[in-house]
Amino acid sequence: MAPEHGRLPNPPSLREFPFNVFMRLLPQGDIRATAGQHESFRRYADLGDPLADDVVAMIQRLPTGVGRAMFETAVEQGIEAVPDAPEELRAFFASIDDEPYWLDHDKLDLAARVSMRTGVVGIGLALPGLALTGGYLASKADKPLVGTGDLYRMAPRRLNETATWYIDVTSPGGLRRFAPGFTGTVRVRLMHALVRAAMNRREDWDYDEWDAPVNQVQLAGTLMLFSLANLAGCQAMGMRFSDRERDAVFHFWRYVGLLMGVHPELVPTSEADTWRLFWLEADTEFEPDEDSLRLAQALHANRHEGPVTELARAYLSSYSRLILGKSNADRLGLVDSKPLQAAVLATSAVNRVFDLRRVVPGMTWLSEELGQRARLGLVTRGMAVTGGDRSYGRHDTLAAVG
């Protein structure tokens, strides 16, 4: 594809199958950036989340446990419940509690129902198999993950914590001020800031090669994984979404992006914006290395947990291989099982052909309810096995200086 109107050529990662096909079929119009847009985007690779970073500095300044306790009180009861709250905390929660004028609660409700309907396909395939595994292709963003714990022990725990947060957020009413999805998102934002502070103290952090740790480009990329990648991953398995549903989903994640601390200039306002963000992320971040391989192996590796679990893990790897393409799958060390890849394709075809929502009245509501029950059951079992923690309290030690 030759450059037009000053647009840059597609990066190598988008010229290979299947992304070269996706690029022709899925986005509406030319999503390539100009050189000016590329330069503007890259400036955000040096920026963290100033409001959250100030809260971490506050926690470090106060006696151990005091700052975190203030934060938790404000999360659960509001900033008014914190006597003599420090200015850093007031500024942070003023931003959190500032509801944007464009927020449409009906769209939030619809997006939650759509997410419920994706059920096990969304939480068991699209999230780990495309969003998380595909996210490992961004090697700069992998560095903090590799630097904060035993990979083989932490990968399943992180997956279940992420899935639990995702379900909290996308359940009905999950983004109301004191609902688990809202409060969980605020805690995730603080966790990112704690990790960022710890990485900034590392003497071996390579700013020239890795950019600033947990920077705005990476936060925006994470947001994109939960919106665009999750929808695309479910579509690949035969699920259908109307234009109205898709619009609601991207509106939903626009609001989550603000709560997560993504800079307003980077938060996509629509699906079209998200595709343009995807192009920039692919061009600047999709550079897998040895850490990408290590993280993917930690998530997908056979842990001898029994034949059923091993088969499910191999099925997930086959799904990832199909949707990420041979080159990316090889870079991530994903198993190449032709029979299981055929099984994934057959499942997708069956789902597409036998979509009862088109012919059976009330089937959409039933699929939403059954999907919610299935995904809740899946993550409840996962959290029990891996010992996940909704508070992310283990990251508090990262606030310690010295």
Image: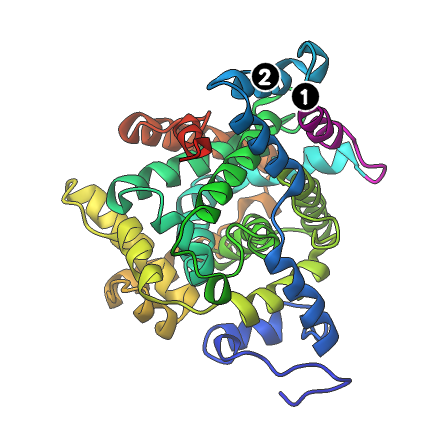
Q: Is residue 325 magenta?
A: no
85 on left or right of 289: right
Residue 162's quadrant in the figure?
top left
Residue 185 showing in the rendered view: no
Residues at marks 1 and 2, CA–CA distance in whole angstroms: 9 Å
Decide which of 327, 73 is in the foreground and name it. Answer: 73
Number of numbered callouts drawn? 2
Decide which of 290, 134 is in the foreground and name it. Answer: 290
Instruction: Check disc 2 and report its element: helix, strand or loop.
Output: helix
Where residue 60 sits in the image (x, y, percent)? Answer: 52, 28
Q: Which quarter of the rendering shows the C terminus?
A: top left
Residue 256 higher or lower than 349, as above or below: above
Q: Residue 86, which numbered label?
A: 1
232 on left or right of 382: right
Residue 93 higher or lower than 276, as above or below: above
Q: Which quarter of the rendering shows the N terminus?
A: bottom right
Q: Residue 70, which numbered label?
A: 2
Q: Residue 300, which numbered label?
A: none
Q: How many neighbours does mark 1 have within 10 angstroms: few (below 14), some (14-19), or many (20 or more)?
A: few
Residue 167 showing in the rendered view: yes
Q: Are marks 1 and 2 in contact (CB under 8 Å)?
A: yes
Q: Amino acid at mark 2?
A: Met
Q: Which region of the structure is painted magenta?
A: 86-102
Disc on the earlier residue, 1 or 2? 2
Q: Amino acid at mark 1?
A: Pro
Q: Residue at x 69, y 30 (%)?
A: 92
Q: Residue at x 19, y 50 (%)?
A: 302
